[in-house]
Each structure stands twice: as C-alpha cells, then as structure tokens.
Image: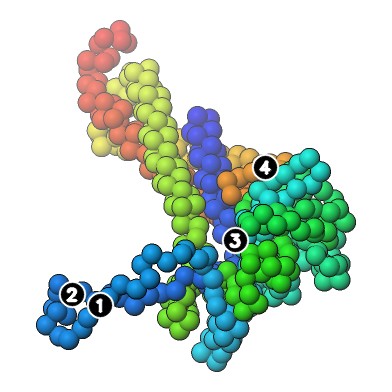
Amino acid sequence: MAAVAVSTMVLVTTISMTRGLLDSFTETIIDAAPHIRIRGLKIEPIPTNLFGVALLSKQVAFVEDHSGRDEPEAVRNYGRVLDIVSSAAFSGKVLAASPFVESQIMAVRGNRNQPVLLKGVDIDREDRISHIGRCLTSGDLVLFRKTPEALLVGRTVAKDLDVALNDQITIISPDGKTRQGKVAGIFFTGVNAADNTILASLKMGQIVEGFPPNKVTGIALKVRDPIDDAPLSRDIERMTGYRCLTWQEENASVLMLFNRIGSIILSLVGFVGVVSGFGVANILVTTVFEKSRDIAIMKSFGFSSSQMVGLFIFEGFLVGLGGALAGGVLATGSIGFLASLHIESSQGPLTKSGFSMSWNPWYFFFVIAVTVIISTIAAALPAMRAARLEPVKVLRESNV
C-alpha cells in the first residue's frame, strides 16, 4: 500500500504541475496579450490558372513589378480598419483595438547594449488590451503621457541594461539614426516575450520605423470570446483584407508542446500503474506461497475455487484502493507545498513566482481509478494459483 501510495502521489503531482503550467500560460496570454492581431499582410486574390479550365474562358494573367523592392508589412490607413472593427457588425464581439508599430532596434545605456523590439502604441488603447498599467513595478502611465520621448521598459530589458526610473536610453533605429528616450516606467507581465520589449508612443514608433502617420505594423484586438475566436478572425480578415492571427495560431508551437507533454504524462500514468500492479501481484504471490496450508484448510472446509479467486482479487482491490486513497491525500499535501513556494522561475514562455499547480479533482479520480483497476487485475494471477491448490497434496507435503 505504501508503494502504491507513493506512485499515486507522484503521478497526481506531476499531472497537476503539467496541466497547471498550461492553464497558467493560457490565462496569462488571454489576460496580457492580444487575442487577435491584424497584421500588415494583404490577402491577395487567387491567381488565374492558365492551364486549367479557365483557359477556355477569356481570362488572362500577367506579372507586374515582379522585381520590386521588399517593403515592411504595414496596415495602411489603419483608421479605416479601426472603424470596421468598431462597427455594428462586430458590436459586442470586439472589446478593444490598439494599433501598434514594431521595430527591431538597438538599446544602449552606457557601455551596455541590447537588441530589443520597440513597440509604439497608443497607451490608452494598449492599456485596454494588455492592462499594462497594473503591470508597472515603477512609474505610472500619467508620467508616460507627460514625458516627451517616454519609454516603458520591460523588466528583462531593464535588468540587462541596468536602468531605473528616469534614466536615459539611446535608441538606434534600423536606418542607423539615434534617438534619446527617458524611462517613465518598468513593467512585468510574466510573459517573457513581452517583458523583453520597450513600449513608446505610437508617433515615436512610426518615426523610428520610418512610417507615415497613417501606417502601422498591425492592430491588436481584445475579443469577448478568446477561446472560440477563429470565426471572428476570419470575418475580420475577409472584411479588412489583412491577415489576422489568433493567439492560438501565434502560440501553436507552445500549445503543441504542452499537448505532447500531457500525452507523455498520461503514458507515464499507465506505465507506473502497471509497475504498481506487478508489485501488488508479487506480494499476493508470496502470500499464496506462505498461506498455502491455510488455503488448503479453507478449501477442505468447503471454500470453492471461485471463492478463493474472489478472496484474492478482493485483497488486490483493497490494496490498490487503500494505497491510491492514501496517495491522493499525500498528493494534496505535495501540490499545496509546491504551490506555496514563492520562488521565481522561468517556466517555458512564462516567468512565475512559485509553481503553477492545478487542483482539478478529475486528476485525482483518474489516477486513483487507474491504480485500483490495475491492482485488481494484477491480483488475478495469484488468485488463479490459489484456486489450483489441491488441499490433500498441500497438507501431506506440509507434514500437518
């Protein structure tokens, strides 16, 4: 029972930690990141197929500006796109929209430099998307609005550059031009990618990237139903003509990794359950060997073979049930202990204080049920052996 209890505790704790990390990632992304991003990639019409059925009609195709210069992706006349997503067609579905300009820059502070993503935003709109105001560890949004060339620096960047509130940072844009910015706040969201960025005003972002006032890199959207946002994304994509990416699509690799880890954990549950079952079977086989005289006497008193099988299977069930229930109690303590540890750690794409644990009761039920079933099935082998014992032969050989 002790062996079964320990294996049950380890399995429940492992599943709780794995699922807790996925739940924490999903909750953090939904709370701090856009649900849908409108990117500056135009959706082009399907080209004409000159070698198909279309050849029979009077359609023609031609190539235009095939050797043109590559331009950065951008949403042109973004005010029109904002009007579309705020129109009656999306009323109640889109909660907030925030245009942004992204630019890969070099941030310099003294003798330290760091390649960083600069994101120009309308801070009031951005606050409705990412709740950046409540993520500030120093400074405030009022200071950001009042300070010319103000910057909000992610905590990771602040540590790398060793900057604090009101410090000056030199920004080197992609075209080599330099610009001074003043730290008006330092933020920590828990999302590693976000904490490795610098926020500036939308106008400053457009200047650094070389965009005119009517052009942005994209538009971030907050929607009412972030779990089922794919249909809404396709509708916006169709009406605006720009590519839309949901948060599930942008984090597909991370979500796939979590799903694979979950499958591995479920396989681990099965393997450890089988090992526990072999342990139970081994104990019961030893019991049959040691209690063979008692079994022979019981059968000579009239116990049938089926009753003996039922007796040992019931013992295996009790061992599995008792051990699994004890393991569930131990798992409750281990999960609570790990959840209470205030140790900051980087868990994949997130930085969390303590371990993200899930308290879903279905994990306990699943592991306990699997353990009990395997222990009960494992008892069948020694039960069959006990049923085949011949009372006369056993008693004669035992010199009773």
Q: Is residue 214 above or below residue 261?
A: below
Which residue, given by chain and number where applicable, does mark 2 sit on? 50
Q: Is residue 375 visible to the viewer in this orientation of the structure?
A: no
Amino acid type indicated by mark 3: Ile
Q: How far separated are the C-alphas under marks 2 and 3?
A: 45 Å
* Three-letter residue code for mark 2: Leu
Task: Tell me where residue 327 appears, x and y as whole percent.
Answer: 55, 39
Question: As shown in the figure, which amino acid type bears the numbered disc 4?
Answer: Ser
Residue at image position (58%, 80%) is 78
Q: Residue 79: which quarter of the image?
A: bottom right
Task: List the residue tagged with mark 4.
Answer: 345
- Direction from residue 395 to residue 148 in the image, left or right: right
Which circle, 3 or 1, is nearer the viewer? 1
Disc 1 crowd, CA 10 A, few/some/many (<14, 14-19, 20+):
few
Q: Quick one: label 3, few (<14), some, or many (20+) residues within 10 Å?
A: many
Residue bearing mark 3:
29
Point out the image quarter for the C terminus: top left
Between marks 1 and 4 in the image, the one whose residue lies nearer the viewer: 1
Q: Residues within 10 Å of mark 2 (few under 14, many from 20)?
A: few
> Which is closer to the viewer, label 2 or label 4?
2
Check whether the beta carbons of the residues at disc 2 and disc 1 lie within 8 A of each other. yes
Camera-side residue: 40 or 71? 71
Q: Earlier in the sequence, mark 2 or mark 3?
A: 3
- Which residue type does callout 1 highlight? Ala
Q: Are discs 1 and 4 less than 8 Å apart at CB?
A: no
Q: Answer with mark 2 or mark 1, whichever residue precedes in sequence.
A: 2
**Given the current orientation, which residue lies at the most extreme bottom position?**
88
Please give the label number shown on residue 61: 1
- Element on which disc 1 rests: loop
